[in-house]
Image (cartoon, helix red, strand yellow):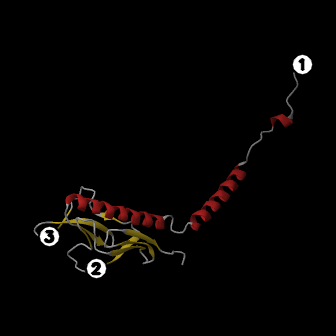
Amino acid sequence: MRSKPTKALLKQSGFTLIEILIVIVIVGITLTFALLSFGDFGGERRIIVAAEHFVNYVKLTQQQAILEAGTLGIKLQPTGYQVLRYSSDGLWNQMPDKSIYAYQSVPSNAKIEWKSTIKSNKSPNIVINASGDMSPFTVTFTKVNKQPIISVKGMHDGQLAIIKHDTSK
């Protein structure tokens, strides 16, 4: 003999639409506070990566100068940098645009500031000789608001140092 289903068995269990919406709102608020706590949404990290890329670019340029037994230079601009080659006619020439030495841009939220022993606007700011020696320099990667994030210091003997600035102020 079959029994009739009772009312308790017919009742469906699960979440109501209101309960699901409340959970979504709570998760949204939590994510909003988490994202706001990161501040610049990784912009500072992109600047640090750009500075590390610059260090590798300088090292690569040093190696190229040694291989070519020639003089190379790096021309700095507030928004990027590029390698120049010193020619036998006494001029600085750009490297081909399709080479690894093409113009390198910094992130849009960053600027480059530098101090170098070379003061001419027509020659590169950093000169690298065939021996790997270079003109001393300090390149600082800053946020657009001029807050320094990280600096790269190049010594005459070709050594490079990275100096991170305190950004908690």
Crowding around mark 2 (Cα neighbors within 10 Å: few <14, some 14 to 19, many 20+) is few
Residue 89, image quadrant: bottom left
Image-based side of 21 in relation to 75, left or right: right
Question: Which badge, 1 or 3, is on the more N-terminal residue?
Answer: 1
Image-based side of 121 in relation to 47, left or right: left
Q: Position of residue 145 (x, y in %)?
A: 43, 77
Q: Which residue is mark 3?
A: 91
Residue 128, image quadrant: bottom left
Q: Nearer the viewer, mark 1 or mark 3?
A: 3
Q: Position of residue 27 (x, y in %)?
A: 65, 57
Viewer-closest of 96 and 144 = 96
Q: Secondary structure at mark 3?
A: loop
Q: Which residue is mark 1?
A: 1
- Mark 2 touches mark 3? (CB < 8 Å): no
Q: Position of residue 101 (x, y in %)?
A: 26, 60
Q: Secondary structure at mark 2?
A: loop
Question: Which badge, 2 or 3, is on the more N-terminal residue?
Answer: 3
